[in-house]
Image (cartoon, helix red, strand yellow):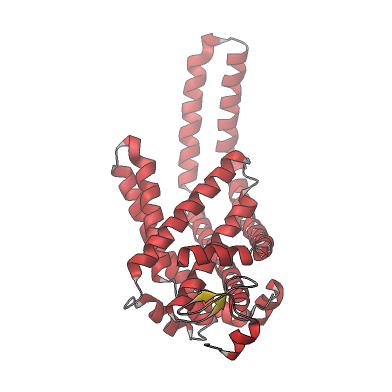
Amino acid sequence: MKFKHTFSVFLDNFSTNYKLLVYGLIVLAVTAGLSCAILIPLLGSITGTAEYAALELAFSDMWQAVINLETGNLHNLLLGIQDALDSFIAMLGTKTGLFALCAVLLIIVYLINRFLSAIGAYTMGCVVNDKMALRANSSFLYSMTKNLGKASRFSLIYVPVCFVYDFICTAICLLVMSVSPMLIKFFSFTVLLILFTAIKNTLICDWLPAVVHGKMPNGKALKFALSRKGKNTAYIFSNLLIIELIVVALNVAAFILTFGAGLLITVPASYLILTCFQFVNYYEGHAMRYFLDENTIIGPERERPLSREEFFRGNDD
């Protein structure tokens, strides 16, 4: 039932998808700007060297000779390219400190991106929770402004925890991919990545709802989420695994069939549906009533339409 209820809540909150899209594009623009501020000076320091100019000239001479069918001097031109390439690689070796600095800065930019994205996820959770609990159409911008402090504290814990987990899992996926036969390299990488993502989402499934609806401190909420006693973990994992397979299939189809344009809808929708599942799972796990849509309220032991007055009065007749 959680699977079916998740899609009902998702459709009921679909307008949030467009707000999340706008926010995601703003975060992407900020991230791209910071990345360019790091990469452009790095590239400038490389392309401005004499070694780069010599390599560029060597390739240009060879290309011109090929176009003019002047193959008599081709061997010397290739040797010139080899010498220029050796000098270029040696020049790159002198800039290892600069490369290391840029790598650290890019990691910081990535963490900033994840921090801002987590604030958006927290805000989305607040909007979904208000709709499920009170049938309130909360403004995305107002919810973000109102809960910015709480969202920031949540992000400060969420981002490092997920970064470490994702780093370890990605390293394992790449290691398995490197030792897998050629025909199943990408298959093994994709399967492991989906499995690790489903495990992560299962472990932290109750974290955001516990903070937003349960009003728990972040540390207590994380501890509550990681405690899997009596939470039917296998059932939650199987639901999340199916949802993630559907999400991956939709995103791949959107990328191929719409030349990437459909990703503007499917990417934020992927985050929204996972958030909806988290709150549906939390509400039903705590036997709480919530609005499935405008006319239907889900109770702990029954599923039938109730009036708003019955819902808020707690009528059990």
Q: Residue at x 60, y 34 (%)?
A: 53
| Position in image of residue 170 (x %, y %) | 39, 55
| Position in image of residue 16 (x %, y %) | 66, 66
Question: In the visual, does 81 lie left or right of 128?
Answer: left
Q: Residue at x 58, y 77 (%)?
A: 151
Nearest the viewer among 207 and 34 is 207
Question: In the visual, does 104 lie left or right of 241?
Answer: right
| Position in image of residue 55 (x %, y %) | 55, 31
169 shown above or below 82: below
300 shown above or below 203: below
Q: Residue at x 64, y 82 (%)?
A: 308
**Is residue 68 visible in this depiction of the protein?**
yes
Nearest the viewer among 170 and 57 is 170
**Residue 202 picture quarter:** bottom left
| Position in image of residue 157 (x %, y %) | 47, 76
Nearest the viewer among 144 and 85 is 144
Q: Residue furthest front?
A: 317
64 shown above or below 54: above
Q: In what quadrant of the picture does the N terminus appear?
A: bottom left
**Residue 196 picture quarter:** bottom left
Q: Residue at x 60, y 86 (%)?
A: 310
**Is residue 164 visible in this depiction of the protein?**
no
